[in-house]
Image (cartoon, rainbow, N blue to C red):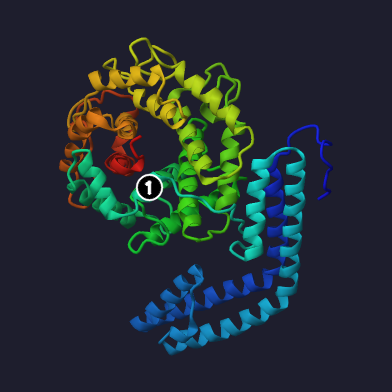
């Protein structure tokens, strides 16, 4: 990279693209150097699988389990041949370890050169950023360079500096803090048991590849991951760590196969929901992982690309539309837009440098405010669109949360919406007023504000969720056979979707700390 003198640059540097380019170059060179080792890993996996199959055929349970554990340890990077008791598996592991060591010795000079070139490119970028007056970006790039130098991040995975974990995410990690926040809101700690049962149901129903369900897998996996992270779980968690890591890896791999786009359904209307939900989940996962010094290959780059995709595909109206249409007549809607803003808020907290984010957020928040009607409720695509058969503005909670998270919580628009929800919101799990989607947003928005209205809301909603949970941890179909008073609630016939919404609502005690 050529270093440019101060005052020469006529336009801001695309920091995100430059960092991505530097990392991609390092990744490609590293991939070539490690190709022999990668082939050895595949051969070893195949040998372990064959050994496990042979053990199963001869009813050698110990051998089958040893082979399976060795495979899992290999995936996690914790394989220790000396600790394997089964002689056949141990012997195979020792051969693999010796061959792997020799291959790494051969590759090390090249890897060292890659690191040196990586650091030099980041130094040059930092100088250019400072000369352009982009000091905040220069600071972020300096943190990347320091991480690579210290070895806390490999050429395959750059960690952009130290992250101070947001208070809400820190507090949701400890049982004592979660129970304290529940009790302060007037809730029952029984909700924690309901959450645990629900998370265990998720763990049991996860697909082998780390996804959930057979359709819209990016969205459904994102929702499940948000529910796990919402309880403070991470890849390091004793009970749910493996489920978290598998989900993260699935989404990262899916994004890698689609140039950063997180979608599996292929349907235009589903794309913005899938991408935004998965992006928010990965951004929250990134905060946890980096705080725990856990490098998941490709995670930060995926969050950067996914977040930038949202910013770059905003509709000219300020909102977001189906298929990420940027200029269509429809102009987007609040439901789609709320998920994009949630994803961008998580990206911002994760520290990834998204270009044009400030302007994007301002346009989006202005768009949200324009959806509000004179009664304080927020419409679906316009001021008077209730998106509900009974005339209730079901997306009012979404509008409130967007403005609160965007720094406009003290504005008249939010106060007016707050009064609207306080006066008109209803919830009956086994009746028509069973809109889980709307109450997901209302719970988060009211939970952030705290106070009497939040206590009344949780007292109305949470006990009903606890009462309607099945023994296996899943939830009954809401509505009691009646037509729900919300179009979005129709999707709660999907057991995975409604379980995730119920979990996220129950976790709203500690997902966002009251101001």
Q: In this view, does 18 lie above or below 243?
A: above
Residue 497 percent across, percent down from the top left: 34, 41
Residue located farthest toward the top when viewing the structure as drawn = 374
* Left or right, residue 127 beside residue 329: right
Relative depth, front residue between 403 and 197:
403
At x 26%, y 16%, the residue is 390
Seen from the viewer's position, the closer of residues 215 and 235 is 235
Q: Nearer the viewer, residue 301 or 322?
A: 301
The residue at which mark 1 appears reads as 224
The reply to whether residue 379 is in sight is no
Q: Quarter of the image containing the C terminus? A: top left
Q: Give above or below for 439 relative to 174.
A: above
User: Does 143 sit left or right of 238 as displayed?
Assistant: right
Label 1: element kind: helix
* Percent of width and height locating residue 32: 72, 65
Q: In this view, does 459 lie to the left or right of 242?
A: left
Camera sees residue 183:
yes
Report the front residue among 451 and 273: 451
Quadrant in the rendering for residue 444: top left
Q: How many marks?
A: 1
Residue at image x 71%, y 69%? 111
Q: Position of residue 33 (x, y in %)?
A: 71, 68
Seen at 71% across and 49% down, the residue is 21
Q: Where is residue 514 in the image (x, y as percent from the top left)?
A: 33, 36
Q: How packed is label 1: few (under 14 Cα within 10 Å), some, or many (20 or more)?
A: many
């Amino acid at each position: 990279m050529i270093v440019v003198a101060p005052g020469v640059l006529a336009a801001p540097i695309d920091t995100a693209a430059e960092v991505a380019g530097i990392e991609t170059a390092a990744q490609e060179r590293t991939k070539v150097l490690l190709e022999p080792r990668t082939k050895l890993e595949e051969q070893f996996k195949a040998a372990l699988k064959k050994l496990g199959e042979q053990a199963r055929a001869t009813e050698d349970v110990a051998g089958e389990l040893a082979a399976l554990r060795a495979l899992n340890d290999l995936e996690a990077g914790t394989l220790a041949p000396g600790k394997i008791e089964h002689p056949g598996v141990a012997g195979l592991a020792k051969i693999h370890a010796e061959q792997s060591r020799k291959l790494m010795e051969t590759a090390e000079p090249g890897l060292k050169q890659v690191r040196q070139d990586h650091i030099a490119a980041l130094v040059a970028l930092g100088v250019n950023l400072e000369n352009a007056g982009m000091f905040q970006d220069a600071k972020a790039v300096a943190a990347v360079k320091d991480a690579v130098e210290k070895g806390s991040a490999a050429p395959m995975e750059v960690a952009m500096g130290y992250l101070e974990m947001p208070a809400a995410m820190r507090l949701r990690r400890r049982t004592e803090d979660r129970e304290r926040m529940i009790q302060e809101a007037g809730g029952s700690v029984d909700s924690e048991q309901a959450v645990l049962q629900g998370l265990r149901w998720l763990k049991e129903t996860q697909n082998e590849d780390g996804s959930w369900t057979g359709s819209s897998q990016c969205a459904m996996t994102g929702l499940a991951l948000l529910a796990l992270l919402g309880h403070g779980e991470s890849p390091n968690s004793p009970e749910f760590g493996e489920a978290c890591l598998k989900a993260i890896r699935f989404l990262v791999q899916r994004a890698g196969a689609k140039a950063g786009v997180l979608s599996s359904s292929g349907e235009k209307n589903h794309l913005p929901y899938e991408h935004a939900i998965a992006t928010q989940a990965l951004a929250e996962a990134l905060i946890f992982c980096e705080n725990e010094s856990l490098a998941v290959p490709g995670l930060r780059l995926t969050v950067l690309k996914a977040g930038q995709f949202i910013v770059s595909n905003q509709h000219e109206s300020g909102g977001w539309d189906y298929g990420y249409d940027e200029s269509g007549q429809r102009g987007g809607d609040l439901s789609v837009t709320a998920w994009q803003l949630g994803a961008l808020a998580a990206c911002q907290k994760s520290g990834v440098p998204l270009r044009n984010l400030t302007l994007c957020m301002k346009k989006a928040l202005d768009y949200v405010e324009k959806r509000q009607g004179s009664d304080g409720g927020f419409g679906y695509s316009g001021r008077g669109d209730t998106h509900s058969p009974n005339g209730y503005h079901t997306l009012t909670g979404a509008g409130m949360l967007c403005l609160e998270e965007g720094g406009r919580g003290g504005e008249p628009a939010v106060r007016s919406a707050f009064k609207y929800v306080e006066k008109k919101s209803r919830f009956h799990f086994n009746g028509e007023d069973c809109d889980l989607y709307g109450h997901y947003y209302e719970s988060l928005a009211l939970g952030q504000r705290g106070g009497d209205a939040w206590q009344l809301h949780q007292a109305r909603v949470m006990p009903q969720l606890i009462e309607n949970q099945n023994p296996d941890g899943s939830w009954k179909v809401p509505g009691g056979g009646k037509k729900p008073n919300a179009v979005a609630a129709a999707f709660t016939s999907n057991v995975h979707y409604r379980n995730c919404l119920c979990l996220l609502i129950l976790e709203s005690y500690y997902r966002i700390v009251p101001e």
